[in-house]
Amino acid sequence: MQPRVADLRQLERPSGGRLVRVGDSGARHFGRLHVAPDHSRSCHSDPPAGSHEYGRRRSAAQGPAPRRGGRYRVGPTLLMATQRRLLPIAAFVAVLITLVAVRLWAGSSEGDPDSDAAPVTSPADERSGAEDELAVDEELVGGIEFTDVTEEAGLDTLHSSTELSGESAMTAGAAATDIDDDGDVDLYLTRVGATNQLLINDGRGNFSDATDDAGVPGNDPDGGSSAAGFADADADGDPDLVVTGAGRNGTVLYLNDGSGRFSDGTAGSGLDDLPPVPDGELAQMHGVTFADYDRDGRLDLLLTHWDDVIPAALADPSAESIRADDDPDGSLVCARAAWLREQGFPRAADAPANRGRLYRNEGDGRFADVSEQVGLPFSEILGFTGSFADIDDDGWDDLLITGDFCTSRVFRNVDGERFEDITTGSSVATDENGMGSVVRDLNADGLPDWFITSIGPVGDATTTVELGGFGSSGNRAFLNDGDGTFTDATDQLGLRNGGWGWGAAIEDFGNDGRLSVVMTNGYSIEPDGADAPPGTAADDPMIFWVPDGDSFVDVASSVGLDDTGLGRALVPFDMDRDGDLDLLVTNIGRAPLLYRNDSPSRHWLTVALDDPTTPGNRAGIGAEVAVFPTPDGPPVTQWVRTGGSYESQVPAEIHVGLGGSANVDRVEVTWPGDDTPQVLTDVDADQLLEITRSA
């Protein structure tokens, strides 16, 4: 079977700055490109006159394009020796009576000279030497530069009017999509103690509040909202909105009427089935992820729940016989979590029910809870972030969930009918406190790797962070072996130490062909991190790793990322459509931060998809896009997703930096459920390219 020639709508920029869809019946305005005088880009160039021949077919002799899994593996598989530490267990039971006690201990012991816990090294101390050296290494930084434009962009509203700390301060969500179909990315921010915000982008990176006009205030402000996500829930051609509850609130479904106004469609949608939150408890819903797990053309919905019944069970005295020698990861909490799984995760009769759910989209804005039917044991997971990815290359999106207290899990999707827990066999879930999640090809072999943010040291510290008798040893970077198993390359890549981590992204922020890893962090028992002493988790500096040989080094302060607040969501998106990725970071209790990317002008390509054959998934969520900058070199392989990071939704498009290349050899799109890629050849750089699926 020959690869199909693309039915393509290409977004070109003629004179006057308007972006126009070419190929529609009549020209359709698609937003306005504005380049500020102090933020110009020389790499934007109008396409040459005349038509382009994008449909060069692969010859019959060549046969179909190769399947995606493993086809572009380059270099040896990265290996590392797993860190092994033996840690004391004396304080474990007392600390894990409630998770609140654990977190309070962590916050109060930091900076306390009389504490018996392992010292937490000051971020400034850990990074000073490296930053002094890196600051003059301009080649390593590559000219990457960010500028804080929060106030001038209109994003200076506080996240909360209520003092938040400890377990009430784990939520500050953000979702990014083009809500008004004008070609630029708009934002939705969740809040606590106040209504949420829908912020409309004017195309220049300036935002105006349209919450009241659109009718999307979110949950009851007293309890607040946590995560949010846009998707076409009723397959009518416009993005709807799902918002999860903080405090004691539930889930809200807003249906878009096509004019930019929304109505509450929660009642009767199936999303109104969550059990009530008991008095004195918090909803703790932290993830909204859309994906078509059963490939029926409708986007299904995953909600994660940080279930605080589990930490109480971990403190069960019956587990006192477990010793550190029995724990191969050097972390007692992982051994106890394994013990608890063997017991079937028993719950007290009066314990509140778990609120994690996988909802199958039934169409017309209706959802059905299929969690038990497909075999997803949410009551065993303190869930934070869910990501879908085909990790074993069988054509079905598998499920990866980050979870606190060694409950991160990997589930294999079996033909869209059920999920099989393959965590142990896949050699993952060694992270003690998995929070953020990013699926990306880290080593250019065409396979989806998995980066998990967790709690760990900062800078070059080697001491495991102590949380009252058990250790937390930092982030994880798992490289996909191609068969559903992974190799832990965290230390070899230098990505372990990121402080108290939350949201993250892996992107080419310099448009120079290099992937950088950015993450936000911070935790405090004081309201909004007020008066945080240096060297504590409440003062964690933001992290920005750039490649240095086979590893990564942190250069955050050299590129202008200076946030030390309590960061949560982190969303990369091109706010002004100038061809580089900007950064949005939400902070507990404070205004968000918007960093404009002011890096040097280099070539780039952004790809969005349109699949008219699946009205419920027009954006092609789950498709693989491989961009080949040169005929013989490996591609940049990405997957169209909107979930991941932490309480974040990113636009349904992929971005590729091309350095000095003004065009790419070809783009291959493998649509969900299809083995044969759709191929475009001789594609110009410096454009937002929208590819329509061939019939």
Image: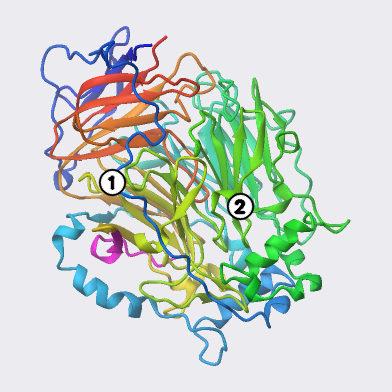
**419 shown above or below 66:** below
Whichever of labels 1 and 2 marks the residue nearer the N terminus, that label is 2
Q: Is residue 554 magenta?
A: yes
In percent of width and height, residue 669 lies at 36, 24
x, y percent for residue 422: 61, 45
Q: Which residue is mark 1?
A: 508
Q: Position of residue 170 (x, y in %)?
A: 57, 59
Count the numbered circles shown: 2
Residue at image x 19%, y 72%? 133
Range shown magenta: 551-568
Residue wearing tag 2: 424
Where 403 sits versus 641, above or below?
below
In the rendered structure, the answer to whether residue 347 lies left or right of residue 643 reads right
562 inside magenta stretch: yes
Q: Is residue 157 visible?
A: no
Q: Nearer the viewer, residue 201 or 98?
A: 98
Q: Residues within 10 Å of mark 1 (few under 14, many from 20)?
A: many
Quarter holding the N terminus is top left
Whether residue 529 is visible to the viewer of this picture, yes or no, is: yes
Element type at mark 2: helix
Tell me the distance, in whole angstroms, between the alpha carbons under discs 1 and 2.
32 Å
Instruction: Name the foreground residue: 405 vs 3.
Output: 3
Q: Nearer the viewer, residue 311 or 36?
A: 311
In the rendered view, tell whether residue 405 sits above or below residue 95.
above
- Image quarter in which the C terminus is found: top left
Query: Type of residue at label 1?
Result: Asp
Tag 2: residue type? Answer: Thr
Residue 631 position within the rendered picture, expressed as x and y whole percent measured from the top left: 19, 29
Of labels 1 and 2, the one closer to you: 2
Q: Residue furthest bottom?
A: 114
Q: Is residue 23 left or right of residue 364?
A: left
Viewer-proximal residue, 658 or 284? Answer: 658
